[in-house]
Every structure is written in structure tokens, then in C-alpha cells.
Image: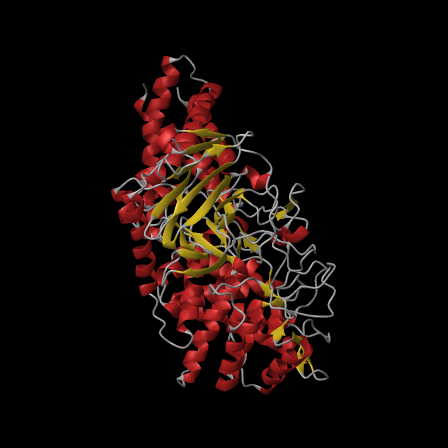
Amino acid sequence: MNFEHVLLWGFAATIVLTGTMSASLGLGLTRMDIPLMLGTMFTPDRNLAKVLGFVLNVVNGWIFAFFYIALLTDAHMLTWWGGMVVGLLQGLFVLLVLLPALPALHPRMATETRGPDPTRQLEPPGFMALHYGRGTPIVTIVAHLLYGGILGMFYS
Amino acid sequence: MCARPYVPIADYGMIGDCRTAALVSKAGSIDWCCFPHFDSPAYFAALLDRKRGGYFSITPVAPYRSEQHYLEDTNVLATVFSTASGVVRLLDCFSVASESVKNAQLWPNHEILRVVEGLRGDVELELRFHPRPNYGQRSIRMVRRGRLGLNCSDAENLLNLQLDLPASTLVLHVLATGTEAFARFSTHAGSRNYFSLIYDNEAPAVIPPLGQSAQARFEVTLAYWRQWIARCAYRGIYSASVRRSALALKLLTFAPSGAVVAALTTSLPEKIGGVRNWDYRYCWLRDAALTTRALVSLGFLEEASAFLSWLLHSTRLTWPRLQVLYSVYGEHRLSEVALPWLEGYEQSAPVRLGNGAAEQFQLDVYGEVLSAVWQLAEHVDRFDGETRTFILDLGRAVSELWRLPDDGIWEVRSGRAQHTHSKVMSWVAMDRVCKIARHFGWSAPLSHYEGVARSIRQAVEARGFSPRLNSYVRVFGGDELDASLLVLPLFGYCDASAPRMVSSCRAIGAGLSENGLIYRYTKVDDGLPGREGSFGICNFWRAENFARAGDIPRAKQWFERLLARENRLGLWSEEIDPRDNTFLGNYPQGFTHIGLINAAVSLEACQRGEQAKAA
């Protein structure tokens, strides 16, 4: 495994993923803000949370890049479409498993069963994060396809 | 299927858990309940179709008289049935608890707990359980599960009814169709029976025990509501009605996101037999400022913060443009469809889902949202960068949009116009954005915004006031009165004692009222056939105008005349028929309760010689 290349393209792919999500936020396709969600696990300060969340997101992206490359190399699928297949699987995992389970893990996220106590917390994402807008599943899948595609195409 | 008469709207009580709620009639029948959320499909919708809708009733077999009341300072509803042979009390509630209690034990996702207490003599009762998924469109097959009761599965959704009856008295049938169950049982003085209906969409569902465990949940529920209302800081005039309104408003809040729905129901008609039937199970931004003011003035800052947080983030998908309404999770596409299989309350068709008003352009929402933000600004240290951008973008949007015609606060379907109320609320938007920016020391084109505010005021005073009527008028250059103009002093646009406002209040009272109740408007083509009832909140706005103008005796007289029209539970619908005081429109209606709270708080302040706060 080329360590430097994983770091380089892992970073590039993460930036594209984050940029895609942020652009979707600005275009009104989704309300999901991944840096905010990650950062508020550690601080209630929204401004600080976004910065912290961005850093955590990049670190996550690097870590996942190693898994992607290991998997793609082992499966002899180190191509753009191979990366996209893994990206699709990860996107589906995030939407179907991770995000619905997030309220149980996130210290500042309300659960679907909260009430009557009012929430001063983040609203829960719901199934496929649909509570954050109907476009959220598509945006999440597209972002992960790009992430995987970049790693598969440019890593050598 | 059992055809039963429709129950008057005022004869329903509300129970809930701040995620969904149910209406229980004086006959002991749950005729409206959606699971898992307010705007989810209904399992009990007999309210909108007595034959197909589905219900869950516990009612004496013999002829009876019944009365309803809430247990003091709670949202636990008591229905007392008196028959020739005895008296029995039915207690209804959703079991609720604080998050800490729920985290310490397995608590059902949603549970309607019904407790039957024998008070005197012997009474034979009949239980009928007939859930019908998707607003009565489908049947649901029941399966006996022994001591676990009746199990009804509908895709991923589960309803489970447990009955706490001695085997010797239980005569339970799942009817031939397998979709309806009934039981007959007797009570005697001192007897106590529990019935637990749970809903869950996760497996395994929590099916809580009955008996002592049910009694414990019931007591936790009582304690929860009493502790919650004990936080109410208001101790002034009409305190009982204010506290009941606060409890009703609390039941209309959606705790997971902080949203407040306009009403519990869809399509209760504004005119019996008419087509003015709308879905109000969504959150209107229009209600924002007045809701925030009500919550803050009563001391419920946590609920006010949660609501503002929802408001700021639910609107994220449409920034900086604001839509009129959003779902409890901020969904903005709420297209309107009819449910043809339901006949509607008292044959008032169509029954609608979604709300076409979501696509309207209403300028006033900007003023209402910014006003809500300003009210909470003094209770927070600072807003984050994203919120600051949002607030300043709203100001910029209004400065660009205020000259456009809009659909207006009442969501008429007859086209856009230059509504005076919308222009005034645009002034409020400019005023509040300047105040917020100054308060937090933000950099913003304040002199430009102040110039826009001056231009709006000039336009309103020049074209929104009719010297002939001696009143502000519905649209620029028009000659129609509109009760929405009663809010001008409430938002601080002018003083209630200003000559133009006093004469407007008088003109609106004279021109829009019937039997002491005010219509929103009359003689206006709103694009729909038929005429509606008097609009609840407008009447409280008038009382508040009197109070703010210093006419306390008249404000009290007007307020008390209104209170005489609330139902025995202290609940209000959207509208009232001035001819016979029949409740009309969706119910219970948060907007009317908000009007009551704000009017009482202002009256109390003015009575003490203090200045009432602006919304």
C-alpha cells in the first residue's frame, strides 16, 4: 500500500465528499450538515462544532481511505467503478444503519421517542435521514460514489 | 361497522404525549388518533367518517349522562358517566415521563392508558376496539395473544391492546371479520380496571404490564404534568384559562424537533357541510412570534428555545425565502390531496391531507419569524454564524420583496394583492432585524433597512388607511375591513391608543362582528363558496387592543364574554359560529389558545399599570 498516496487521495476524496454535501446544503437539497453533526458530539458551540466536525470528517475520510484501498486491492477492483461500488455500499450503510442509530450514540441528538420534555438538541435523522429533507439519501449516495470513485481512479 | 352520530367538536377532549395526540369524546370514544406523529396516518378517524373511520370506545351499556374535565393541572382527561344504576369514571391519558425516568426503565413508544373507576353502584360497560389504518382506508386483522391481549400488525406498525379484566367478566369477541373487538364488563364502587393500547414501529415493542405497573405509570404521568405546569410563571387574571391553554399548547408541541403544530386535526370544517376543510397538522411560521411570546411570557423558555431552534433549521431548505408552513421535521413539500373514501365530519367533504397554502407567498411570515427571534435574543448570549447569516438574509429578502403583492395572512385562494397587514409585518421585519443587529453588534446595512422601514410606513399610512371608513383597510386603496389589522399595536407598529388604531378597532368591531364575535373578513371573495365562522384569535386580539389602549373594563368585559364560549374543558377550536356558539374548524387550535394567553398577559400588565410587551 502506498501510504502517501492513500493520504493524498483520501484527503482529496474527503474534500470532494464534504464539498458535495455542503453544496447540497446551500442548494436546498438537504439540511444535513455532517461537520455540525460530528462536532456537536464534543461541543454545544455550533461555530466550534463546525470546525471540529470538519477536522474529524477529514480524519474519518483518511481512515476510510485505507479500508477502501485495502478492500479494492484485495478484490482486484482498483478502478473508478470499483471505488464507486464500495462508496455505494458505504453510503447505504450510513443511510440505513449508522444515521438511524445515531441518536443512541450522539449525546446531543434527540431520539424519535423524546417527549414531552422539549428538545434543545439536534433533531433525529430518521430512516435514511429523510427528516433532513427528501434529497438527503440521493445526496449522501452521490457524495460517497464520488469519494470511492476518486480513490479507485487516482490511487496507484 | 357501527354508524354513530357525529359528536359536537366541543365535546372532545385532547390527550397526548407531545409526539401525537388523540381526541376522546364525551361518550368515551377515541375518534381521532394518528401514529406515530401528529401528521402520520390516523388509526382512529371516526371523527371524519363515523362508519369507516375507526375508534376505540368504552361506554356504559345503559342510557347515561356524561361530563368531561381534566384532572387538575394535568392533561389527564376524566369522563364521568352517570347511569340509573351507578356512576363510573373513565380516565384517559398518554403515559408520559421525563427523559430520565424513561431512560431508567423500558417505557412504551406510545401508550394510551385508560383507567375505569367504579364510583357508585354497578355499571355495565361495553368496550369496542376498531382500528382502521390509513384514515380508515384499510382493515387490520387482530390476533389474540393470551394475556398479552390483542395484537394488530400493519406492515411495520403494531397496535397492541391489553385488557385488565377478571376472566369471569370478560366476554371478548374478535368479530367474524377479525377486525373489530368488543367486551362487556361491570364495575362496582371501588373497582379499577386498566386498558393499555400501545403503538410501536420497532420490534420488539415494549408491552408494559397492567395492574400496579399501569397505576405507577398513571401516577408518573400525573406528576409529570403537575411538575410541568408548576413552571408556569403567570399568576395573574384568568389564570385557570391561561394554564389550561398552556397545557393544551404543550400537547401541540412536537418534542423531538421543537415544532408546534397548528392543530391536532385535519378537515374539521369551517362551515358544516362546506368545502373549507384544511389539514392543520403542520407548523405555520405565521404563528411563530405569537407562540414565542406566549411561551416566554409564561416562563416556558425551554419550549420557546426549542421552537425557535426548529424554526431556524426547518426553514434551511428554502433560505432565504420562507415558506408559509413546514412539517414537524421541516419538510416543505406538503402537496394537498383529498381522501375520497372519507365522508368528512357531518358530510363536510373533501377531507384533505397536506396543505396547498405551503406554496403561497405570504410576506408577513418574515416579520413574524424575525419578531420571534428578537423576543428570544435577550435570553441568549449570541447566535452562531449560520443563524446570523439567516437573520440578515431575511432582512435583505424583505427589503427586496416588500413591494410585491402576496396571498396574505388568511391564505385566501382568490389571488395576490397588496395586503396592508403584510406591509405592516414587513415593517416589523425591518424593525426587528435592525434591533437584533444592534443588540449583537453585527455589521449590517442598518441605515438602508431603516429607510425601507420608513418607506413601508409611509405606504401603509398613505394607502392602507381609508379616511372614509376611518380605519386601516384590508388592501391598499381598498374599502374592506380585516381583523388581521388588530395586530398592529401588538407588534409595536403603533400605539393601541393612537387615533387611527382606536378608530380602526371600533370600525372592525362594528363592521365585522355578529353576536359579539368577529369574523376575519366579510364581503370578500376568498375564492371559496360559503361563509365561515368567527375566527377565534381575532376576538382575543380585540380584547388585547382594549387593554393596551387603557380601556381595562371593556377589555375584561370582552374577554369574559369570550371565556363564556370556551368548552367545559377550556379548549378552543379555530372558529366559532356566532349564531349558536358551535365550534368550527380544526381543534384544538393552538392559535386561539395563544391569543388567549397573550391577551390575558397583556391585560394583567396593563391592569397593573405596566406596559404590555410587543410580540
The quadrant of the rendering that contains the N terminus of chain B is: top right
Q: Residue B40, position in %: x, y?
A: 52, 43
Looking at the picture, tell me which residue is in the foreground, B111 or A97. Answer: B111
Looking at the picture, tell me which residue is in the foreground, B138 or A97. Answer: B138
Residue B309 visible, this orientation: no
Q: Residue at x 54, y 73 (%)?
A: B562
Q: Residue B555, position in %: x, y?
A: 51, 81
Above or below, B524 against B507 in this view is: above
Q: How is the image coloured?
A: secondary structure
Looking at the picture, tell me which residue is in the foreground, B92 or B300. Answer: B92
Above or below, B583 against B327 in this view is: below
- Report whether B220 appears left or right of B294: left
Number of marks in the rendered image: 0
Residue B397 position by quadrant = bottom right
Q: Residue B614, position in %: x, y?
A: 47, 74
Q: Residue furthest left?
A: B104
Above or below, B119 against B294 in this view is: above
Residue B320 position by quadrant = bottom right
Q: Residue B370, position in %: x, y?
A: 49, 64
- Report whether B397 appears left or right of A10: right
Residue A49 visible, this orientation: yes
- Report whether B590 appears left or right of B419: left
